[in-house]
Image (spheres, rainbow, N blue to C red):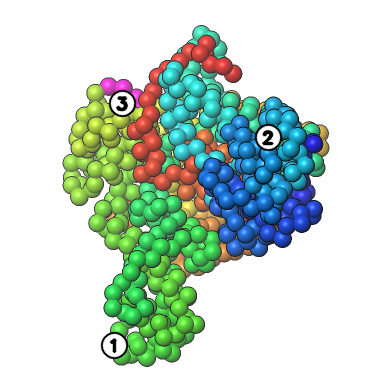
Amino acid sequence: MSLDSDSSSQGGDRRSFRQITRDRLLFEMLRSTRKDSKSAWKVLIMDKFTVKIMSYSCKMADITEEGVSLVEDLYKRRQPLPSLDAIYFIQPTKENVVMFLSDMSGRSPLYKKAYVFFSSPIQKDLVAQIKRDSSILPRIGALSEMNLEYFPIDSQGFITDHERALEELFCESAEGFNKYNACLNAMATRISTVFASMREFPRVHYRIAKTIDASTMTTLRDMVPTKIAAGVWNYLSKYKTSIPEFPQTETCELLIVDRSVDQIAPIIHEWTYDAMCHDLLCMDGNKYVHEVSSKNGSASEKKEVLLEDHDPVWLELRHSHIADASERLHDKMTHFVSKNKAAQRQQARTGGELSTRDLQKMVQALPQYTDQIDKLSLHVEIAGKLNVIIREQCLRDVGQLEQDLVFGDAGTKELINFFRTQLGVSRENKLRLLMIYAAINPEKFESDKGTKMMQLAGLSADDMIAVNNMRCLCTDTKKSSGGAFTLKFDVQKKKHAHRKERTTEQSAWALSRFYPVLEELIEQLSKGELPKDEYNCMNDPSPSFHVVPTTTSTSVHTSPAHSMRSRRTGGSWARPRGSDDGYSSDSVLKHASSDFQKHGQRIFVFVIGGATRSELRAAHKLSSKLKREVILGSSSLDDPPQFITKLKMMSAEELTLDDLHI
């Protein structure tokens, strides 16, 4: 029996990234077994890893609709069902193959027939092991490589589920070298399966190591993008011959960077609704727990909700500035009352505006409005909580100083003065300020100056480890001759600017100056202008490859004659009505329904060591601006508390190039 790599998708498929992933699992895998199966219902068997893959893309109802009556764990004891066929979706590991053989070999197999789908390429010796068992072969209906080993987190985002990538790839200790290689190999495998699913063959760009000669000290962490790029390229080369209809020439761009590209983005306070929810509300993934009135009205009960794409209010507001989101929610509530006669009567009786709880009680008798008001009242509650936290934690003052540090409007003096005078600021927020300062001024922490500042901020020993470990992600950018990492901009005007102002995209909201470096890199990649001394390409373009011209010059928002941003307003949210900064809910809805058929070649970006919500937002924004679908991938999606915890687990130890195995 030959090992197949089935394909139903054509190159250049313009369905959304998440939709393609879902369709492959449901149709290419589950539905394909209907052709020669006599069993109306089947059992789906997965390992822990593939269960997670499936849960990110499909609902149980989707799976049932494709004829699956039971979902089982490969490693749990299962009841024999000899009258039913089974679908195995498993990783191609030796342990999994042994379990499969145990299920289907001998005189009494657990299932009538098995359709086996591996999540990534399987080694030849494991295929041979399956073929050696003569009792197995007649019971196998399919043996295929799905090449799908990633987790869609968004319509334009995915992760490889390497939560410990920072520790395993950037913590350079000899005893961790095996983990280093294992993590690299698994990550490269999972990234490559994205292109197997999308039927895309990319030009592979990557950040090059600063030093590649044996006479200079180099680090394992500095080689990470190079090694990942090489691993991905190796799999892509195999796909060209093993996957039917896989493109033979370049169809898209892939840029591989690591977290050192921007140490500030994972730490700085991001002021959009999505980012603030995950940063400040202690959510479990996308799960939010809130209290709602019980049906009998006697007490309240806890309810779990998912803040995801199925919620239209969330989809509309997630990339909006928190002030914009609050305003729009208020407008929606007012509109609801104005259109609802029952609400108007209740409002007249109460003699004032209705509270969220009043509205919830009122609509219990109006089932047709229940879903609408539940979603609205949920987000009104969330926005209210966020605004309370912003006030209580003095986040407007914290956010102002953060951005002033980044853009060179504040320095050491202002930071010290802030620590001495702002007594209401929490230790956690002081830690984040110091981490931003350390990313901008790593040399300050090579002496006791850094220690004194940490003591002034009242940091704990663990906090100090996190600040010091910012150096693990330092790229020595001061010595750079140019490009995205240069620290000095407008030296005559700025104290120590780490990022240059984007004068073409002024935001009308306060505290919205900051943008992730990735946004700039994607634009450079789209125009073919990545700095040659910092980025390399694995494959020169084929003669048939053409860079799609972008419409950047016509779609960039021109700045007004005078900036509407306030630097020292104490958090003024003033903005004119009707403005479109690319992040507003109107823009999100407008761009969410974009026709991908009109877009140019896709741009894929992968961040090793954890991506941020600001970077995911940039992918959505730039897809509209550049007219090219931008898909962001990473080892994980980290909110600031998670990222700081991961930094505390790192250590820094230098190695020579002789220690590397490239």
Q: Is residue 324 visible?
A: no
Q: Quadrant of residue 286?
A: bottom left
Task: Provide the residue span drawn in magenta.
Answer: 441-447
User: Looking at numbered disc 2 in the image, what kind of residue is underneath it?
Assistant: Pro
- Of the residues shown, which amino acid type is indicated by label 1? Gly
| Disc 2: CA contacts within 10 A as few (<14), some (14-19) or many (>=20) | many
Q: Residue at x 30, y 52 (%)?
A: 395
Q: Residue shown at 43%/36% (left/top)? A: 263
Instruction: Looking at the picture, tell me which residue is in the foreground, 407 or 433.
Output: 433
Residue matched to label 1:
351
Q: Is residue 90 magenta?
A: no
x%, y% of residue 465? 30, 30
Figure quadrant of residue 328 = bottom left
Which amino acid, by three-letter code, is at mark 3? Phe
Kind of element beneath mark 3: helix
The residue pinned by badge 3 equals 445
Q: Residue at position x 43%, y 57% from top?
A: 287
Closer to viewer: mark 3 or mark 2: 2
Cα separation between marks 1 and 2: 68 Å
Residue that mark 2 sits on: 121
